[in-house]
Amino acid sequence: MVDYKAKTKNRNFYVYYTELVLENADKERRSTNWSDKRCKDVQMLISLIVELDIKKRTKRGDENNPWTMALENMQNDNIISNFLEGYFISTENGIHTYLLDRESLERLSNPKELTQNETMQTAFSLRFKDGMFILGEYQGNIASARRIAEYFNYFLIYFKENGMLVTDIAEIRFHHKIDQGFIDKINGFERVNSVEIGLEMLIPNQPRQDAFSTLANEVSDANIGRIVLTLMKKDKNGICSAKIQDWLIKCCDNWSVNRGKLKGKACPGHQSEVSLTGINVKKKCALPVGTDGEVFLTALYEVMEKMNEEIELFVF
């Protein structure tokens, strides 16, 4: 157990479920449930990545989005061995100004080259029995769940094409696990009249063909911080609750949802207005940091290990 007397930083641990897309000999694709066989294939994939030279296992963005990330470590030697855990290192080109001595207030030249940036660690775990994926995230996180999936899929293709991995898995996707309490609130409506959702105005990591991405790019230089979208019912039947759940999952997968609400006619004993706060399954922790300002990796692992023990088996 970590017991450091040190400064702390907040970390959010988000829970995702893993979708596996299979491809047959005719190039036909279909999604499948998690299984022991698929689990072993994913474990093998991650092990093969870690065994690569650091230069080969590093991925970079383009000149307009200059990030760098690599899977640094993976281990599954915990006592029970029912999940693996590891972490990514990442960096992103940022500001390159002079340094300021906080004591003397002397301005100093910055010795860093433009290609040199501070690294960040993003810890994760993957549970074997059901594919539950936990990611320790923070503001400005480079190794997001979406980018990690793209990273895994790049090497999935590479290893399959080079005969190093035999599997019918064609793609790995991570989806936010919607909190059951929030689903219960949606189901507490007899009729949903309107859905309002606020999304952070962020340029996507990868080009996307959706309305939000188009709008984000169009107004990127207009000092706009958030999109607020309101959906209204078409007729007296209201908005389909099942569609709301699917749509919110897609929004959470691709965008940061920072506010929102549902309004409608509630069933007896339920609220007629529900906030989108707490939509995702997550755990927020204040964790100790070292002298370098980075959260101790052992502290990150301890939180994820406890979550793997506490969260029940996923059923999709």
Image (cartoon, helix red, strand yellow):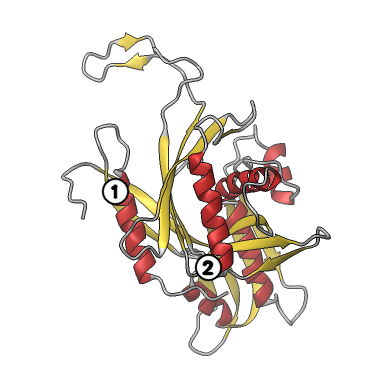
Name which residue type carries label 1. Answer: Thr
Q: Amino acid under label 2?
A: Ile
The reply to whether residue 135 is visible in this rendering is yes
Looking at the image, can residue 257 be seen?
no
Residue at image location 34% in from the left, 10% down from the top: 108
Up-down relation of residue 7 to residue 30 (above or below):
above
Q: Quadrant of residue 266?
A: bottom right
Q: Quadrant of residue 188?
A: bottom right
> Which numbered circle lies on residue 186?
none
Q: Position of residue 177 (x, y in %)?
A: 52, 65
At x 63% / y 67%, what residue is drawn? 195
| Residue at 25% in and 20% down | 102
Q: Which residue is mark 2?
A: 178
Image location of residue 121, percent across then percent down: 40, 40
Dot label at residue 298: 1
User: Quadrant where the C terminus lies?
Assistant: bottom right
